[in-house]
Image: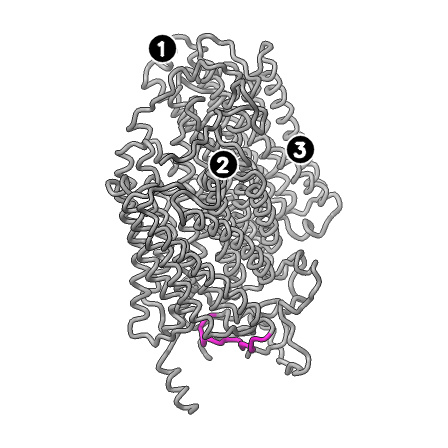
């Protein structure tokens, strides 16, 4: 029994199925589950930040409410719309990949990239405004300056620490998203066999991007629209 | 179940578009809800100064956010059509992150003794800032006193 | 051998040609010999061997640090090190042992090697991710050891704020980044295990037939994906506080140090289950095999792993009774901490019941397993002292704590690791080690361990604080006993290196199943084929289908 000849029959596996899998279905559902368990870690990852936010927001509710007027809800709203639309573009790209319409996939991914860069551009405008906020610098660190006499500087710094830490981490995720969608576009443009037989790689990138969207869906009301 | 990703389960353009429109509506709703105290000064006192109003406003904001998250997770991320294991994992993260909230029992049931005057201390300074030396970041901590054990 | 039917899987029945006796059989070790074939391998068995090699090195480094600490503590006024050196040394010991040995040892070595074999898969679900996790681990380990050697870290492995974020000089930032990367390495492994265990089981391998080893690793992986990102983010916030002064954790900036402790222990208490659950799962396999009995209460042992994974997240506050945490919350955590003892006790009782009237064979893995039982019971029950708020106030931050968690971590996890190493070494290498030396060595480890840590219970109970290296002379006898024991323990850890390496060259061939164990991994050759199985097996037999009486009759018949 032990010495049975090597007879895996890789030959009759459909193209695009890696050797550890039996068939495409097993491979696809494994990939989706793996991605979801990774997204669980991402949820917990951001969870720490949200818990810190909750604690300090609870403790300094009034002052956080006053400080948040410095943030522009219009720009934040623009970015929310931006990300929501990019999420829609991603599902459309995945749908086209399922229908094997290469050209449309590329178009929709282009839309996603536009949205992502737009998001970063708006974010840059906002960060810039904080960088020279009336000749003051609101970025925590050595040069943090505060002039608002009504609100103690320390609390202002806490608010901006939370703001920059959370939106910054989210921004890093957006940048990573741009990179992986860039790779995807390259693969689709080159008609790589990795994506021709299987739409799942794009679906996984999509799941990641939706997660980035989810984080922003919470960040927007928590920072830009703080109710008192 | 076997072919849950197979061709005939590709969702229609309309399904995705409707979801997107719904999300957009919810986004507008959350913005509008947040501006109501400013646009209708009559409501400002109730919504801003009373506890009930505050709870109401926060609940609305987070409720709308949760609804948006539900839509994205179920429709865009395809959890609605996924197998049970995937559904379980999709739920697990969001449920588990709330367990961290147990720590709020702590903050709720003990006083928080602040360092006196921390909030007005020179805000530009780094935490280890003082004038007498450098650490690895060009800032100084309190000079560490190393006292040998005296018996 | 009708317990598991190796079927032809997908109907690819091909007659098995007889192997040529002159050419050695191709296995995962000899399939190719180049360095790049090891460094770029996607084979889970080779990655496991890479891990085995690298964790051994980190274990040696951490052990050397422990040796320095013990040598220093021989004398009440210190002998070797200055105060700062001592602080850096125990931090190095803690950080290296926890982040680069205990958290990864059993899952990354034996989990990687065995899970696909046990469930009848060709490989883990994501082989590239698996390799990436090893590289992340190596980068993290190198960074960590570098930080320890150049500059050092003196904050303890817990990185408590505001010491770590504001006051401590030294390479705290680098050490934290190392811990962060090590976290992502274990997340990669855990994601791999979860996807593999859910989706890649062989036909017929239902959840009811999964070896308890796989159950234990599944529970571990769930804890890793739920917990590790929390500590990663928390430590990242410490770095941000060090560099930008964001002030979440430092009272001088308006933060709360207890917030750090909450978030740190939210992970780090479940982390002790990340360390011990794989140990449990190893012990289940060994005890079933060497008692020649189906594990008693299979379902209870399996579900208790999941219960530990769940409850483990609800007890973190028992690390913080004296940290100004609200006493009301302390009460809640105390109650929940007692609850988490239940599933652990379920396991211990079931193992004992498995051995009862079993046909016990005291091979070296079994000696390790039995010493695990004794040591873990002591470690677990002293945990109850610490779960009770009133006694904890007296015992916390004393050597009692140190002894308690070493009984669980070393007496538990490291003993289980040694047991696993001896149990599966023939499978991994195809060679048998000298069994008698291994048995005596297991006894040496047991004696050395107890000699090291039992005195610490006493010293701690009498009030000797941990992390102090100048101490009142009345504690010296206990410390001398402990240091003596640690020498014996160190000897017991070094000996296996020699005889295991010797066995690679000179050991006799083990054959596919030297222990007569049940389970799919024993159905392949030793060492296994690069593709694990020649056919995907079809599982029809129940799990742990041991029958001591039948084996006995078979032996009698042979005679």
- Dot 2 and dot 3 residues touching (CB under 8 Å): no
In the image, residue C548 sits, relative to residue C460, either above or below, namely below
> Tag 3: Cα neighbours inside 10 Å, few (<14), some, or many (≥20)?
many
> Tag 2: Cα neighbours inside 10 Å, few (<14), some, or many (≥20)?
many
Q: Is residue B115 left or right of residue A79?
A: left
Quadrant occupied by the C terminus of chain C: bottom left
Please tell me which residue is depicted at 68% across the width and 49% down the height of the picture: A195
User: Along the line of sight, which residue is nearer the eye, A156 or C479?
Assistant: C479
Label 2 and label 1: CA atoms lie apart by 42 Å
Label 1 and label 3: CA atoms lie apart by 44 Å
Q: Is residue C221 visible?
A: yes
Residue C405 coordinates in the image, percent (x, y): 37, 50
SS of the residue under disc 1: helix
User: Residue pushed farthest right?
Assistant: A190
- Tell me the tag on residue A113: 3
SS of the residue under disc 3: helix
Please tell me which residue is depicted at 64% across the width and 73% down the height of the picture: A6
Q: What residue is pinned by disc 1?
A: B45
Q: What residue is pinned by disc 2?
A: C235
């Amino acid at each position: 029994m032990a010495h049975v000849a090597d007879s895996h029959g890789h030959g009759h596996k459909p193209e695009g199925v890696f050797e550890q899998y039996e068939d495409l279905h097993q491979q696809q559902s494994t990939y989706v589950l793996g991605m979801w368990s990774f997204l669980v870690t991402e949820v917990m990852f951001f969870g720490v930040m949200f818990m810190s936010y909750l604690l300090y927001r609870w403790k300094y509710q009034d002052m956080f409410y006053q400080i948040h007027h410095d943030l522009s809800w219009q720009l934040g709203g623009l970015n929310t719309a931006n990300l929501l639309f990019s999420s829609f573009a991603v599902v459309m790209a995945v749908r086209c990949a399922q229908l094997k319409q290469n050209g449309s996939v590329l178009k929709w991914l282009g839309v996603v990239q536009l949205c992502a860069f737009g998001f970063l551009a708006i974010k840059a405008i906002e960060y810039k405004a904080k960088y020279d906020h009336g000749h003051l610098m609101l970025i925590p660190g050595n040069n943090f300056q505060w002039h608002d006499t009504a609100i103690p500087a320390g609390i202002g710094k806490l608010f901006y620490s939370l703001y920059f830490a959370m939106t910054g981490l989210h921004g890093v995720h957006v940048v990573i998203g741009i990179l992986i969608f860039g790779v995807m576009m390259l693969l689709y443009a080159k008609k790589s066999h990795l994506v021709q037989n299987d739409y799942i790689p794009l679906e996984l990138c999509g799941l990641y991007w939706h997660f980035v969207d989810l984080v922003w869906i919470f960040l927007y009301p928590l920072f830009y629209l703080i109710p008192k | 179940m076997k072919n849950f990703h197979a061709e005939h389960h590709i969702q229609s353009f309309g399904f995705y578009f409707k979801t997107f429109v719904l999300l957009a509506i919810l986004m507008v709703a959350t913005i509008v809800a947040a501006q109501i105290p400013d646009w209708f000064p009559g409501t400002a006192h109730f919504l801003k100064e009373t506890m009930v109003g505050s709870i109401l406003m926060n609940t609305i904001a987070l409720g709308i956010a949760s609804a948006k998250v539900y839509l994205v997770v179920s429709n865009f991320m395809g959890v609605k059509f996924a197998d049970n294991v995937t559904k379980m994992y999709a739920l697990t993260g969001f449920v588990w992150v709330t367990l961290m909230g147990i720590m709020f029992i702590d903050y709720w049931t003990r006083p928080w003794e602040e360092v006196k005057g921390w909030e007005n201390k020179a805000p530009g300074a780094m935490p280890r800032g003082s004038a007498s030396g450098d650490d690895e970041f060009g800032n100084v901590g309190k000079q560490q006193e190393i006292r040998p054990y005296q018996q | 051998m009708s317990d598991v039917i190796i079927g032809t899987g997908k109907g690819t029945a091909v007659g098995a040609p007889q192997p040529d006796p002159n050419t050695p059989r191709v296995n995962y070790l000899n399939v190719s010999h180049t360095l790049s074939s090891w460094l770029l391998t996607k084979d889970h068995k080779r990655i496991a061997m890479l891990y085995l090699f690298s964790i051994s090195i980190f274990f040696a480094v951490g052990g050397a640090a422990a040796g320095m600490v013990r040598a220093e503590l021989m004398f009440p006024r210190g002998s070797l090190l200055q105060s700062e050196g001592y602080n850096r040394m125990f931090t190095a010991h803690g950080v290296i042992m926890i982040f680069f040995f205990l958290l990864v040892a059993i899952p990354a070595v034996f989990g990687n090697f065995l899970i696909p074999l046990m469930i009848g898969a060709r490989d883990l679900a994501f082989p590239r991710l698996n390799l990436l996790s090893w590289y992340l681990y190596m980068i993290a380990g190198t960074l960590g050891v570098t930080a320890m050697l150049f500059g050092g870290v003196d904050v303890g492995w817990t990185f408590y704020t505001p010491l770590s974020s504001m006051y401590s000089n030294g390479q705290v930032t680098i050490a934290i980044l190392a811990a962060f990367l090590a976290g992502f390495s274990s997340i990669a492994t855990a994601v791999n295990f979860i996807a593999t265990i859910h989706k890649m089981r062989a036909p017929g391998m239902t959840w009811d037939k999964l070896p308890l080893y796989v159950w234990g690793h599944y529970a571990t992986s769930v804890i890793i994906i739920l917990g590790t990102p929390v500590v990663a983010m928390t430590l990242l916030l410490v770095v941000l506080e060090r560099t930008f002064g964001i002030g979440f954790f430092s009272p001088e900036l308006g933060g709360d140090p207890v917030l750090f402790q909450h978030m740190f222990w939210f992970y780090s208490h479940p982390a002790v289950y990340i360390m011990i659950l794989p140990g449990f799962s190893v012990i289940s396999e060994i005890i079933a095999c060497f008692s020649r009995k189906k594990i008693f209460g299979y379902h209870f042992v399996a579900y208790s792993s999941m219960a530990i994974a769940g409850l483990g997240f609800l007890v973190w506050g028992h690390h913080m009774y004296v940290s100004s945490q609200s006493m009301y919350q302390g009460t809640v955590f105390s109650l929940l901490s007692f609850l988490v003892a239940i599933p652990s006790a379920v396991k211990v009782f079931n193992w004992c019941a498995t051995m009862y009237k079993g046909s016990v064979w005291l091979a070296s893995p079994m000696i390790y397993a039995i010493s695990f039982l004794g040591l873990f019971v002591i470690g677990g029950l002293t945990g109850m002292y610490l779960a009770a708020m009133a006694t904890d106030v007296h015992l916390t931050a004393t050597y009692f704590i140190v002894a308690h968690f070493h009984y669980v971590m070393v007496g538990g996890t490291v003993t289980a690791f040694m047991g696993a190493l001896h149990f599966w070494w023939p499978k991994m290498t195809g060679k048998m080690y000298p069994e008698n030396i291994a048995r005596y060595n297991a006894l040496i480890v047991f004696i050395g361990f107890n000699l090291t840590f039992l005195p610490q219970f006493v010293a701690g109970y009498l009030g000797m604080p941990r992390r102090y290296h100048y101490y009142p002379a009345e504690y010296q006898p206990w410390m001398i006993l402990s240091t003596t024991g640690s020498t014996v323990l160190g000897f017991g850890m070094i000996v296996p290196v020699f005889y295991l390496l010797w066995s690679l060259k000179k050991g006799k061939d083990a054959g596919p199943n030297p222990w007569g164990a049940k389970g799919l991994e024993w159905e392949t050759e030793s060492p296994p084929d690069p593709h694990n199985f020649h056919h995907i097996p079809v599982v029809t037999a129940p799990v742990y289908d041991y029958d001591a009486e039948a084996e006995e009759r078979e032996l009698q018949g042979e005679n």
